Structure formats: C-alpha cells, structure tokens
Image (spheres, grey):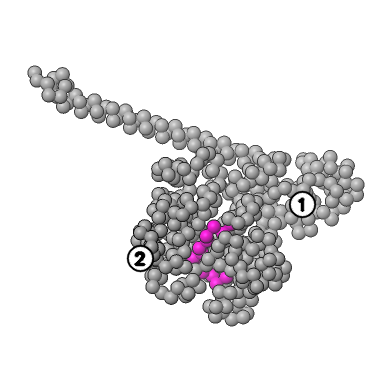
C-alpha cells in the first residue's frame, strides 16, 4: 500500500496554540514549588519537547495543561479559550494524552480502547466504528487483524501505536505525550518515533512531548524547551540553534559531545534521496532470479516476502546454495528505515548490516527503495564542513571583537592623562 500523502477524511481539526502564563504548582507541605512561574507560548501545529533532568518538573508541567494536576496559580489558554477554570473532564476529552507503556485498559479490546473517548463524547456507533478502522490504518495496524485483539496479545510497539490511536481518536487539536516510547526496545523506539513524525506531517496537531533523551528531542521537536529545576526555562529554541549555540553550560551538558553527529537527527531519509534497487519475490521462479542477477549491473538483489516487505539480501554467490528454493539462500534483512527516519538512524542501520545500504519501507513495511553509505557519508561530510566553517567564522568574530576592545582600551588610556598619556600627569 502506498504511503498516505494527505489527512484522513475525518481528521478535520488541526492544532491549537497553547499559552502558559505564570503557571505554578506547590504541593502541600513543601515550601518550594515543583513548578515555578512558567511562561511559554506554543504555536498551533508545533511539536515542542520538554527535556530536563529527573525531578525538574517537566511531567508536572505537561499534566497541568490538561489539568491531571491542578495548577496552584497561573493560567492555561488553548486556542482562544482559557481552560484554567472549565470542567477538567470536558477539557481532557479535547486533549489527547499518551503515556509510557501505552496505558491501555487490559479488559478492553483494541477497538474498545480506541473508541473510549468518542463514545464518551456521544459519537454514533457507525461514526465510532469508522473512526476505529481509520485510526488503526493511520498508525499502520491492519484493522482486520487487530480490531478484536486484547492488549496482552500485542507487542510493546503495537500497544504504543494503539495508545497513540486512542489519544487521537476524538480528533483533538492538542496531543500530550509523557515519555510514550520509554518502555520499548531501541529499534522499536526508532520506528515509533518515525511513525509519530509521519503522523504529524498528516495531522498537524499541537504536540507537547516529555522526554529525558536529548537525541529523541532533537529528532522529534520543532522546538525544544530545556528545563532546569522547577521547570525554569534554560533555553527554548529550535534543535539547530541549541546544538550550534547552547545558552550556557547547563544546556551544553544536555547537548553533550558530538554535536555535529547529533545534527544527523535533523535530516530525514526523504531529504537525501531514496534510490531504486532490483527486487524479486519469494515465490518467483528461481530461473527468473538467476536471469535478473545475471543481466543487471548489481551483483545482488533484495528478496521480498508475499507482502512486499524486505526479507533477504541475495547475492549471485548465494544462488549456488539455493538448491531449488530461495528460502535457503541469502542473508536476512537486519534492519530497515522509513522515509521519516533520520540520517543517524539510517547510518546506524547501514553500519549494523555491514553491507553499505539499508532498505527504506512504507507505513506497512512495504519496500520503497534503498539509501546507501555513499549518500550518508556525503551528508556527514557536508555537516562537518559546515561546522568547521562556522567555527572558523566564530573564531574570526571573536578575534575582531578582541582587537576592537584592545584598541578602545589603548585609545582610552591615551586620552585620559597628560602628554605622556599617563593619568594624572602634568606638563
């Protein structure tokens, strides 16, 4: 199935702006606020990441937006509405919420979990049924296969996809995500991040996302809020600006070493070009595979399964071991990336596979093309060269500033005193 290029039919609501004004939370018995006087404006359709050390108040700040935690003082505006004083249950039906480990109700099927908020909102049965199928398709799960399953019958990554589908089911303008991918393995986490990027391209919601992982923040965020203790904002800027110009040592500590390589998280596979690659199906006659390898410029091809998903890399030398069945030949595909994956993801996949290329797949895992090591390394060199030039320009600017200060100091000394230029001297 080709990747979707537009919004789902019922995804009419795009994002809404969020404004936090002097938002504060003080817990009883604690003299110091957990969140202290936070002011922040988040644009409609923007993905903003809250990142900071454990206990700094980032999750508390997030939960005050939908009033799972009631603010002690301050104001919250979503769009043109002040939501500080409205019924919190009504507010939460208008704000999607996804948490770590999905938070699905174990006694409900996938369909019942997704239908929960639309049902509470009063949607008709037919509208809910259509929305459930639409949301499952949107997050890359086959409705026929997953509709009646229970959470215990799903993998961790599948549960998180259902959790996101449930959060988006009632078409809210705002989606709050509290470390939603923190409980899954790294490979699944990368794919879930790519899925969120793809969804945001289609839906244009306003997303507030909490993480302690700065690499995840760089990959997902339009802007990043680096928070100190009590949610004081150390820097609120684009990933590029924070990587190239951290505000202070605290922010630099989050950036860490290898800022140039971290910038690989800012470029997507779709931005560098995906190229064609010869393929064959697992059920193709062995002779046709021989002919394809013998006639092409490549000495290898990609074997696809019955759903056109990458299955094995097959070289000419493997055919001698085929013995009438392609299932016995070739090397299993170790990893794939989507077009929304970052260059860092792609580079890691290429290095893991150790064959100079990685397969690129669509939303259902179907093969699209490949991206190769040469393309990736060219982009790495361009980033490193850009960093080198920026560093040289910055050094030049610092030298000019130092020269101007030195000249001004010398001129000041020369004009402050008598003929000898000594302060207080007399002719």
Marks 2,1: beta carbons within 8 A: no
Provide the residue designation for mark 2: 73
381 over 93 or under it: above or below: above
Task: Please give the name of the residue rendered at 66% of the width and 62% of the height, measured from the top-left corner.
Answer: 158
Residue 97 is one of the magenta-drawn residues:
no
Residue under label 1, please give it.
Answer: 311
Question: Which badge, 2 or 1, is on the more N-terminal residue?
Answer: 2
Image location (x, y in percent) of residue 259: 51, 40
Q: Residue furthest front?
A: 29
Give the quadrant of residue 282: bottom right
Give residue 329's position: percent from left, percent from top. 84, 46
Q: Secondary structure at mark 2?
A: strand
Q: Quadrant of residue 69?
A: bottom left
Rendered-image quadrant of the N terminus: bottom right
The residue segment tinted magenta is 169-181
Coordinates of residue 9 in the picture (x, y in percent): 58, 70
Can the viewer see residue 197 in this picture? Answer: yes
* Pick the front one: 156 or 402: 156
Within the image, what quadrant is residue 113 found in? bottom right
Of residue 40 and residue 28, the one placed in the foreground of this image is 28
């Amino acid at each position: 199935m080709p990747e979707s290029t537009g919004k789902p039919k019922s995804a009419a609501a795009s994002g809404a702006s969020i404004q936090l004004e002097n938002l504060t939370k003080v817990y009883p018995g604690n003299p110091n606020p957990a969140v202290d006087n936070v002011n922040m404006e988040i644009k409609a359709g923007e993905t903003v990441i809250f990142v900071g050390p454990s206990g700094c108040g980032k999750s508390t700040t997030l939960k005050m937006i939908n009033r799972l935690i009631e603010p002690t003082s301050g104001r919250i505006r979503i769009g043109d509405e002040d939501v500080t004083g409205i019924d919190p249950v009504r507010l939460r039906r208008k704000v999607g919420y996804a948490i770590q480990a999905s938070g699905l109700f174990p006694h409900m099927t996938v369909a019942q979990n997704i239908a929960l908020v639309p049902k509470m909102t009063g949607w008709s049965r037919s509208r809910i049924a259509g929305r459930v199928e639409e949301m499952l398709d949107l997050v890359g799960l086959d409705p026929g296969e997953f509709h009646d399953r229970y959470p215990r019958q799903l993998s961790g990554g599948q549960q998180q996809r259902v959790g996101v589908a449930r959060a988006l089911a009632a078409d809210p303008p705002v989606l709050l995500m509290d470390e939603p991918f923190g409980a899954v393995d790294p490979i699944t986490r990368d794919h879930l991040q790519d899925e969120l990027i793809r969804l945001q391209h289609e839906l244009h919601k306003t997303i507030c996302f909490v993480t302690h992982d700065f690499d995840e923040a760089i990959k997902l965020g339009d802007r990043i809020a680096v928070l100190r203790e009590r949610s004081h904002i150390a820097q609120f800027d684009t990933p590029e600006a924070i990587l190239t110009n951290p505000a202070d040592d605290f922010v630099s500590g989050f950036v860490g070493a290898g800022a140039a390589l971290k910038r690989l998280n800012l470029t997507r596979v779709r931005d560098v070009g995906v190229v064609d690659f010869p393929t064959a199906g697992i059920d193709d006659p062995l002779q046709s595979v021989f002919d394809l390898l013998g006639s092409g410029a490549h000495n290898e091809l990609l074997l696809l399964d019955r759903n056109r998903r990458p299955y094995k890399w097959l070289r000419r030398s493997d055919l001698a071991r085929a013995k009438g069945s392609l299932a016995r030949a070739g090397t299993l595909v170790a990893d794939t990336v989507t077009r929304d994956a970052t260059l860092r993801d792609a580079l890691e996949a290429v290095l893991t596979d150790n064959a100079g290329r990685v397969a690129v797949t669509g939303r259902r895992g179907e093969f699209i093309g490949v991206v190769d090591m040469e393309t990736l390394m060219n982009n790495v060199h361009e980033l490193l060269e850009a960093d080198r030039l920026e560093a040289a320009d910055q050094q030049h600017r610092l030298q000019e500033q130092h020269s101007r200060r030195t000249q001004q100091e010398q001129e000041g000394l020369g004009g402050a005193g008598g003929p000898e230029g000594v302060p207080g001297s007399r002719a």
